[in-house]
Image: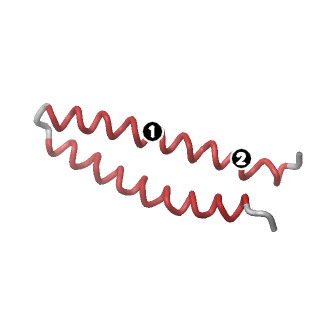
Amino acid sequence: MSNADLLPPLLSKIYQNQLALEAALMELTLWVERRGSAEVAGNVHGALDTISKNGEFINMTLAVLMSPE
């Protein structure tokens, strides 16, 4: 397997890690919200929005990289 062939699977694993981190942060955010720290939760929601938007681009790019030429 060439180095170029390794790039899509590597990026896919990185993207999966991003999704897992996003889910974990969301769980922590909900926990913080329930304990009355709306300001902190709001800040985290803003960061999660950025992760989500970037995730859409990453997913689309992975689909292109993994498609047969």
Residue drawn at (43%, 60%) of the image: 53
Task: Tell me, for residue 42, which label it has, or none.
Answer: none
Residue 33 lies in what quarter of the image? top left
The kind of residue on which mark 2 rests is Pro
Is disc 1 placed on a helix, strand or loop? Answer: helix
The kind of residue on which mark 1 rests is Leu
Task: Tell me, for residue 9, which label it has, or none.
Answer: 2
Q: Compared to 9, does 59 lie above or below? A: below
Residue drawn at (72%, 52%) of the image: 8
Q: Are marks 1 and 2 in contact (CB under 8 Å)?
A: no
Is disc 2 placed on a helix, strand or loop? Answer: helix
Q: Residue 35: percent from the left, percent from the top?
A: 13, 31
Q: Compared to 61, does 17 lie above or below? A: above
At label 2, counting other C-alpha atoms closer than 10 Å, the crowd grade (few under 14, some 14-19, many 20 or more) is: few
Gap between marks 1 and 2, in whole Å? Answer: 18 Å
Classify the position of the C terminus by image quarter. Answer: bottom right
Q: How many marks?
A: 2
Residue 66 lies in what quarter of the image? bottom right
The residue where tag 1 is placed is 21
Q: Residue 11: percent from the left, percent from the top?
A: 65, 49
Q: Compared to 14, does 31 lie above or below? A: above
Residue 46 lies in what quarter of the image? bottom left
Residue reaching furthest to the right? 1
Q: Is residue 23 left or right of residue 29?
A: right
Q: Residue 26: percent from the left, percent from the top?
A: 33, 40
Q: Compared to 47, does 64 lie above or below? A: below
Residue drawn at (41%, 43%) of the image: 22
Classify the position of the N terminus by image quarter. Answer: top right
Q: Residue 3: percent from the left, percent from the top?
A: 84, 49
